[in-house]
Image: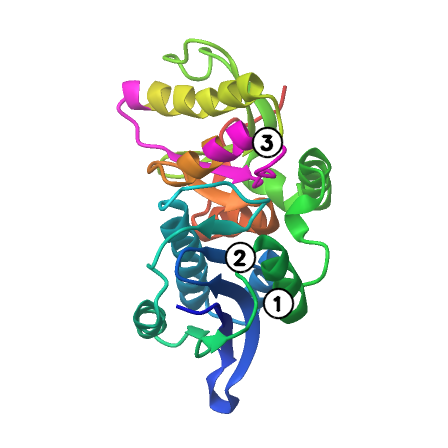
Amino acid sequence: MATQYSILSVLIRPEIQEKITVGFLLMDENNVFFNFSKNKLAAAKSLLSSNAYKSLKDALYNINATAENQHLKEQPNTITSRKSNTFSKSYIEYLSRYNNNILSFSTPKEIELDATIDIFSKLYRKFIDNSTIIEKKPFTNYIQRFKQEKRLILSKHFNIDRKVTNKEIPNLIVPVTVTFIGQNEVPTFVQSLDFEKRTDFLSNDISEILYLQRAFKDENKDSVAMSIINEPDRIKFPQQHEIWRQLRNTSGITHYDISEADAVIEYAVQHNVQPFLNTEE
């Protein structure tokens, strides 16, 4: 199999076949390199229906997960490289049909170059995205700015940066500080998780989500748990990246990339979430 590439595009206006290029595959007999632009994904969100956007997002992350599951070696950042024949022409055609034309793949094109990370990076920047990607803004700064800019609407639905104890949740063993907490039929909370933290601090932050879920469960209450996360650099933070990958595959917690933080507001509005407590400390 010669080196081939395929460009992934989002169909935003079917009537005139208008598309946005969003992802890039480079492959040969032994290697697959894949990446998609979170900038382009964020742009597509405003142009698609909520169902179409969810289908697109799920498809892109599923393609990435397929490559992740064939783990043989690490490559930089959001780029996936794996020795595998999974991304064959027939598989690409299947993916295109499966996603109902929301996400399309160009016919694989052969090039007389080796499938290497350097070649991939150059072609990705040329065809897909050469700009600074959203998630590379410092996570803490992004979250603080998000809370400041959206505070008016956030405060209508959540208590913000609230420390809760067993006074508020009787079965909570240790106090937990939660980024956002509210309720409608069930308690609803959001925790921000900085995956560039030390692993012991990160583990503690994740444990707090589990503590809250368990405390509500012990009261025979369901709860809605969400997190706002950032994908860490795979080279600089290999342990954190592995935790990030595993956490995204767990059920029971809905995860949003920092570029999608507005989704927690959309959920709160749609489900009429109200602050969990009537007053702030």
Q: Which residue is mark 1?
A: 128
Residue nearer the viewer, 97 or 11: 97
For the residues labelled 1 and 3, say whether their Cβ atoms are less than 8 Å apart: no
- At 48% from the left and 90% from the top, the residue drawn is 15
Measured in 3D between alpha carbons, the distance from the residue under mark 2 to the one under mark 3, in whole angstroms, is: 18 Å
Q: Quadrant of the C terminus?
A: top right
Measured in 3D between alpha carbons, the distance from the residue under mark 2 to the one under mark 1, in whole angstroms, is: 9 Å
Magenta segment range? 217-242
Up/down of 116 relative to 1, above or below: above
Up/down of 25 relative to 134, above or below: below
Dot 2 or dot 1: first in sequence order is 2
Q: Which residue is mark 2?
A: 35
Up/down of 240 relative to 200, above or below: below
Q: Is residue 90 left or right of residue 189?
A: left
Residue nearer the viewer, 206 or 90: 90
Residue nearer the viewer, 165 or 72: 72
Please count the marks in the image: 3
Q: Position of residue 205 (x, y in %)?
A: 52, 23
Residue 145 visible (yes or no): yes
Circle 2 — which element?
A: strand
For the residues labelled 2 and 1, say whether their Cβ atoms are less than 8 Å apart: yes
For the residues labelled 2 and 3, say whether their Cβ atoms are less than 8 Å apart: no
Dot 2 or dot 3: first in sequence order is 2
Measured in 3D between alpha carbons, the distance from the residue under mark 1 to the one under mark 3, in whole angstroms, is: 25 Å
Q: Quadrant of the N terminus?
A: bottom left
Q: Position of residue 218 (x, y in %)?
A: 29, 18
Q: Looking at the rendering, which quadrant does residue 139 occupy?
A: top right
Q: Is residue 256 left or right of residue 219?
A: right
- At 52% from the left and 60% from the top, the residue drawn is 115
Q: Which residue type does callout 3 highlight?
A: Phe
Q: Which residue type does callout 1 highlight?
A: Ile
> Does residue 220 show up magenta in the picture?
yes
